[in-house]
Image (cartoon, rainbow, N blue to C red):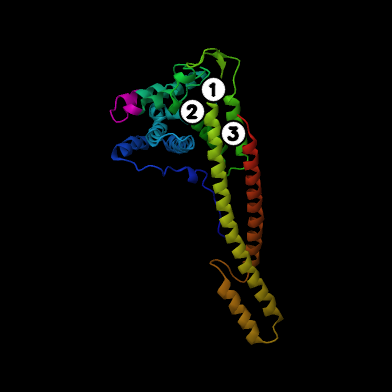
Amino acid sequence: MSSYEFDFYDKTSLKSYNLTSSMRYQLSMLDKLDVFTKKHCENVASIVCRICEYLHLNKNFTSYCTICAYLHDIGKLFIPPKILQKPGKLTDEEYEIIKTHTLIGYKMCMDDLQLRPYALGAKYHHECLDGSGYPEGLQGKQIPLEDQIIKVADEYDAIVSKRQYKTHVNISDTLKILIKEAQPSNKEIALDNAASRAKVGKLNKKVVKTLFKVVIEDTEYEISCLTGYLDFLKEQIKRLNTILDYEIKMNNATNEKKKNYFKEGMKLLFSEGENYDNYQTVLEEYKTALKERQKIIDDLYNEIKIIKKLKV
């Protein structure tokens, strides 16, 4: 039986910009990273690109932000693999080592003329609006906009990867975590453009809210993929039911000529791997798959309803 597998990030691949030779050089730096970090950087860049588009930022700035996102974790190239890929909780000492990837990435970019324009993306993507981030504990608008956007996409992809989502069902649970991160803590900071002290959370609320639009679009895309697969399942079930009908008629036939006629009809309708002995088992598998996929579609539609009601 043909199977269906959803590519969680298929819709988020970067398609909006033609990469120049300079950009290709910049992105070639990712080839030096381990496969997991490289994939994470690609995911974050794709999400950042689409967030920028939803925010109606100009094309040049969107392209700039996207390249920054591709390179944001480039400093992890020099983090020991046993720490970077540790499955369990990091020790305080190991966490301090991990944190150095921001400054290492910044230095790598500053030392390369073609990467230098994107250096702040590597340095400040772990800064938080409330000043609780690193490496400098920047606050509010001290943090470049590109880093505020990367921060949201970075956290989203990290949670999605950790939870190993295979579908957008229950993805609202991840968004709720980001909403919490965007809420003000008890700490007060003075924003650059504020006359009075204001309370902020770790994440930019507007960026988090914009991420919702990206996730809804991806969820709708998954539904469209599943709907296409449902059409395939229905066609197979119809074909196999025709074979079943032929078998009943064959068994009820009163002479060998009619029996052979229906038997040959069954044979012509078999797909690869199917035969007289197993086709009914395949039919039941398709029926089960149809029921399961229809439930996922229903759950995805419900997920969209939940996301649309979320407040940041």
Q: Earlier in the sequence, mark 1 or mark 2?
A: 2
Residue 36 location, quadrant = top left
The percent coordinates of residue 241 (x first, y second) are: 65, 69
Tell me whether the residue at label 1 lies in contact with that at label 2, contact meaning CB atoms closer than 8 angstroms.
yes
Q: How crowded is mark 2: few (under 14 residues within 10 Å), some or many (20 or more)?
A: many
The percent coordinates of residue 311 (x first, y second) are: 62, 31
**Which segment did they paint magenta?**
107-117
Amino acid type assigned to the residue bearing label 1 in the image? Lys
Badge 3 element: helix
Name the residue tied to disc 1: 202
Q: Is 204 situated left or right of 79 in this image?
A: right
- Residue 110 is a magenta residue: yes
The CA span between labels 2 and 3 is 14 Å
The CA span between labels 1 and 2 is 9 Å
Q: Which residue is drawn at 63% across and 56% down?
A: 289
Name the residue tied to disc 2: 151
Q: Which of marks 2 and 3 is nearer the N terminus?
A: 2
Q: Which mark is residue 23?
A: none
| Front in this rendered view, residue 302 or 41 | 302
Amino acid type assigned to the residue bearing label 3 in the image? Leu
Q: Which of marks 1 and 3 is nearer the N terminus?
A: 3
User: In the rendered view, would you say 167 is above or below 98?
Assistant: below
